[in-house]
């Protein structure tokens, strides 16, 4: 375990040496690679079955050990009864030739058999199974990613640590709580990222649960050690002093605690002396730091929309939203059986199609996609290539129309309803958002500063987006448009459609959108990005730039 000393000025270091105080140590190294939890509920269900298989194997091992112990008990009872009788009259007992023979036999043969029984390893089957299954276990990065996902959900949905620890989340069927150890581990994950704001929140939750009498292998001293440092790093020297004194009440010999106490007191006296010589009568208090990323305007709007607190459309605008039956511009497929369509937003125009993909089709799409699900990628504007990104947390797969008639039928349906040529569109992308899965605000189209965004495709810019919702989501997971305040919620069997470009070919910046983190449940979507090529006569250009 690597420790890092607190960064100090040269004068402070000199003072520390004078006071013979050890510098405050960082408890865990932050050199771990910065990764996120790119997984899906689809893959995590496989882990549940893996764990179930291991549990069956463990129970079989326990049975084998119990059977072995039962045999050992029988041997002990047998030897005990013989020994009781023999030691009462050893000479008389051994005077019987059969007893003398049996004693030789027991010590030479039977005790050896018992030894072999005791030494017999009953764990081979279990250990072998565990070794095989271990290759499918989550890594340290996965565990860290899951912890970061919980922290992300806290921030996005304004949840406190108590709510998460008690599992009081909306729409949950399976209650789950966090133990002290869990809260402590979440605090440690934040700590290794130098995220002292969340370190403080989770260490305080662990401390509260310990104070409430929860039994844990984590003691208060360890929690207070982390907590006092995290609080100090955020500028609250008085609270750091109070927590350090509490630590030393529990463990007066704690070396780092004693060093920190002297150091904090030295810093306080230095600040007080500085204040007394200052021209200003009132000391300016140190500002506590907040969330690490700050509150950027777009981030604030994005999170508000995710919580359902966004901009509300005026009644006048709402009156312009309608529901209708659509034949897709007199498509032969939909004239006799038109699709149900409703307006979700007016500018940009976002429409939703209801009952547009069947449960059977959804099941087939999932079946084809699951074996191929990989960490989702985005277009790098600098290179035009697909790369992974921290702001997109999901797994995705691409399906071609020639692979299965269901995919070909879905592609054809999109073409009939939109009136756009999908032969130049990208393949159907299937995505699964698991724990805290999200896609932060982004544009689907390539902007002017990204001239090579889709150059390798040779089909022009992304003119439109078609998005299928293939699952209901218990809580969270909305598609939001921060620029305009629109929020579209997942509903299984529906799809939403919008144009990314004006008819002039210019990008519509109001279509910047995001996939909110999934709070409870699993979100399955599939999307089709339709490109400019092939639409020249289907959606002719307009002369005005914003038309």
Image: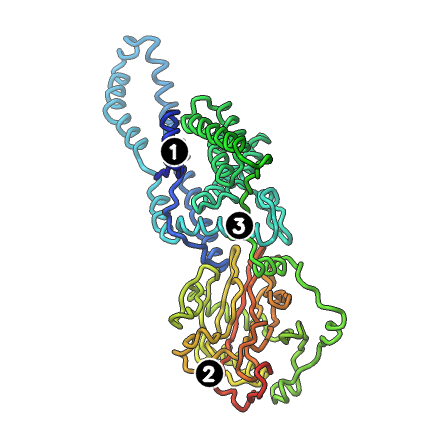
Element class at badge 1:
helix
Q: Which mark is residue 150?
A: 3
Is 110 situated left or right of 207 in this image?
left
Distance of label 2 from label 1 (alpha carbons): 67 Å
Is 257 situated left or right of 115 in this image?
right
Give me the residue at 36% from left, 13% from top: 85
Q: In this view, does 5 lie above or below 369?
A: above
Question: Within 10 Å of the Cα at label 1, are there few (<14), some (14-19), or many (20+) other Cα atoms?
Answer: few
The C terminus sits in image quarter: bottom right
Is 172 situated left or right of 126 in this image?
right
Is 312 situated left or right of 522 in this image?
right
Residue 441 locus on image (x, y percent): 54, 64
- Between disc 3 and disc 1, the foreground one is 1
Give me the residue at 74% from left, 68% from top: 314
Element class at badge 3:
helix
Question: Within 10 Å of the Cα at label 2, are there few (<14), some (14-19), or many (20+) other Cα atoms?
Answer: some
Pick out the residue farthest to the front.
279
Residue 436 locus on image (x, y percent): 53, 55
Residue 266 locus on image (x, y percent): 46, 28
Q: Residue 424 carries which label?
A: 2
Give me the residue at 71% from left, 76% from top: 323
Distance of label 3 from label 1 (alpha carbons): 41 Å
Instruction: Mark 3 and mark 2 in contact? Answer it, CB < 8 Å.
Output: no
Labels 2 and 1: the sequence-earlier one: 1
Element class at badge 2:
loop
Residue corresponding to mark 1: 11
Which residue is nearer to you in this view: 44 or 128?
44
């Amino acid at each position: 375990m690597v420790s890092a000393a607190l960064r100090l000025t040269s004068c402070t270091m000199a003072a520390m040496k004078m006071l013979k105080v050890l510098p405050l140590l960082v408890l865990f190294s932050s050199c771990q690679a910065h990764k996120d939890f790119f997984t899906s509920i689809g893959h995590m269900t496989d882990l549940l079955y893996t764990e179930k298989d291991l549990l069956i194997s463990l129970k079989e091992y326990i049975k084998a050990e119990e059977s072995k112990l039962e045999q050992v008990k029988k041997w002990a009872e047998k030897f005990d009864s013989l020994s009781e009788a023999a030691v009462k009259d050893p000479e008389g007992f051994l005077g019987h030739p059969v007893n003398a023979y049996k004693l030789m036999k027991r010590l030479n043969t039977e005790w050896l058999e018992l030894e072999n029984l005791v030494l017999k390893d009953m764990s081979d089957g279990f250990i072998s199974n565990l070794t095989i299954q271990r290759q499918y276990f989550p890594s340290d990065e996965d565990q860290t990613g899951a912890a970061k996902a919980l922290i992300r959900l806290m921030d996005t949905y304004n949840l406190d640590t108590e709510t998460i620890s008690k599992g009081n989340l909306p729409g949950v069927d399976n209650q789950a709580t966090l133990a002290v150890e869990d809260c402590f581990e979440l605090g440690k994950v934040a700590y290794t990222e130098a995220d002292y704001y969340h370190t403080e929140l989770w260490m305080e939750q662990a401390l509260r649960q310990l104070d409430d009498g929860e039994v844990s292998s984590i003691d208060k001293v360890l929690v207070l050690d982390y907590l006092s440092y995290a609080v100090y790093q955020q500028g609250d020297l008085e609270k750091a002093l109070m927590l350090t004194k509490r630590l030393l009440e529990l463990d007066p010999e704690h070396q780092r605690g004693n060093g920190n106490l002297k150091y904090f007191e030295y810093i306080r006296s230095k600040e007080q002396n500085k204040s007394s010589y200052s021209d200003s009568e009132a000391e300016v208090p140190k500002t506590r730091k907040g969330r690490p990323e700050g509150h950027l305007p777009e981030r604030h709007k994005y999170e508000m929309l995710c919580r359902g607190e966004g901009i509300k459309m005026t009644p006048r605008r709402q009156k312009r939203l309608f529901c209708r039956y659509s034949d897709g511009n007199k498509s032969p497929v939909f004239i006799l059986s038109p699709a149900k369509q409703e307006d979700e937003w007016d500018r940009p125009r976002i429409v939703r199609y209801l009952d547009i993909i069947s449960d059977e089709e959804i099941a087939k799409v999932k079946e084809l996609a699951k074996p191929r699900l990989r960490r989702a990628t985005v277009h790098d504007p600098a290179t035009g290539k697909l790369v992974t990104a921290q702001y997109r947390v999901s797994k995705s797969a691409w399906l071609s129309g020639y692979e299965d008639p269901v995919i070909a039928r879905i592609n054809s349906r999109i073409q009939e309803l939109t009136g756009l040529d999908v032969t130049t569109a990208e393949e159907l992308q299937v995505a699964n958002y698991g724990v805290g899965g999200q896609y932060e605000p982004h544009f689907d189209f390539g902007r002017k500063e990204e001239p090579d965004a889709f150059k390798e495709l040779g089909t022009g810019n992304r003119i439109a987006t078609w998005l299928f919702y293939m699952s209901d989501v218990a809580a969270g997971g909305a598609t939001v448009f921060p620029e305009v305040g629109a929020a579209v919620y997942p509903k299984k069997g529906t799809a939403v459609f919008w144009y990314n470009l004006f008819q002039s070919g210019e990008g519509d910046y109001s279509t910047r959108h995001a996939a909110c983190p999934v709070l409870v449940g699993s979100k399955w979507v599939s999307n089709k990005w339709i490109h400019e090529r092939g639409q020249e006569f289907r959606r002719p250009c307009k002369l005005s730039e914003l038309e």
